[in-house]
């Protein structure tokens, strides 16, 4: 879509009512600007068409897709090998939270093999990008699902001034007050 935004803008420019501009500039200048915009629009369209026509067909899909970022992350992880899967930690966790159990199993089941084989991407930087609860070398156990569990209950304020929510969030106590009465 971003590739077509300038063309849409040029189309709108060509159809605008430019009476205010014609008061400032001569009609010949306004007509020249409109024609220049139209020529550039045609040139951009032709060049982009040539670009798509001359590239390898399998790469054209890189320029358009109806697949969301979440769907793409899921597809790359589920269909890819370790080299492709490792990129998941470069995306936001929201993209892979729906299948984080699969990510956790993949990391836990593959970590020892990676330590033995030492693939070129298995660097300190990459190991540092693995969330702590998924990283076997950190010693944190419980997995991704343990971090998500939150238990909330309504609890009265000891001074009786406010009622609040008290919850256990990933092992730590958190409270949210609703304010004074």
Image: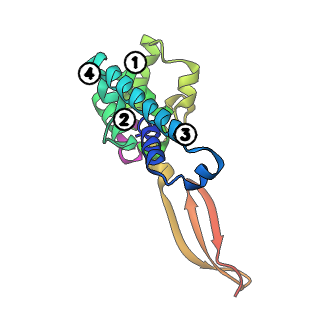
Circles 4 and 3 in contact, beta carbons < 8 Å: no
User: Label 3 belongs to which residue?
Assistant: 28
Q: As displayed, is residue 63 above or below residue 68? A: above
Secondary-structure class at tag 4: helix
Residue 63 location, x and y as percent?
Answer: 36, 31
Residue 80 location, x and y as percent?
Answer: 31, 26
Residue 103 location, x and y as percent?
Answer: 39, 36
Distance from label 4 to label 3 (Cα)?
A: 47 Å
Q: As displayed, is residue 74 above or below residue 57? A: below
Distance from label 1 to label 2 (Cα)?
A: 13 Å
Question: Measuring 47% from the left and 38% from the top, which residue is drawn there?
Answer: 6
User: Label 2 belongs to which residue?
Assistant: 105
Label 2 crowding class (10 Å Cα cut-off): few <14, some 14-19, many 20+? few
Q: In which quarter of the image is the N terminus?
A: top left
Report the disc number at residue 58: 4
Task: Answer whether residue 174 is visible to the viewer in this image.
Answer: yes
Circles 1 and 2 in contact, beta carbons < 8 Å: no
Distance from label 3 to label 2 (Cα)?
A: 69 Å
Label 4 crowding class (10 Å Cα cut-off): few <14, some 14-19, many 20+? few
């Amino acid at each position: 879509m971003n590739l077509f935004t300038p063309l849409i803008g040029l189309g709108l420019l060509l159809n605008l009512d430019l009476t205010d501009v014609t008061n400032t500039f001569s009609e010949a200048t306004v007509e020249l600007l409109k024609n220049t915009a139209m020529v550039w629009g045609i040139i951009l369209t032709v060049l982009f068409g040539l670009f798509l026509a001359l590239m390898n067909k399998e790469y054209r899909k890189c320029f358009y897709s109806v697949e969301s970022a979440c769907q793409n992350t899921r597809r790359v992880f589920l269909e890819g090998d370790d080299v492709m899967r490792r990129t998941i930690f470069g995306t936001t966790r929201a993209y892979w939270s729906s299948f984080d159990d699969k990510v956790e199993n993949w990391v836990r089941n593959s970590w020892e093999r990676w330590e033995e084989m030492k693939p070129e991407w298995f660097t300190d930087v990459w190991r540092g990008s693995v969330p702590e609860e998924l990283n076997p070398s950190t010693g944190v156990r419980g997995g991704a699902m343990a971090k998500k569990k939150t238990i909330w209950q309504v609890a009265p304020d000891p001074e009786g001034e406010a009622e609040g929510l008290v919850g256990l969030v990933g092992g730590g106590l958190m409270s949210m007050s609703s304010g004074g009465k």
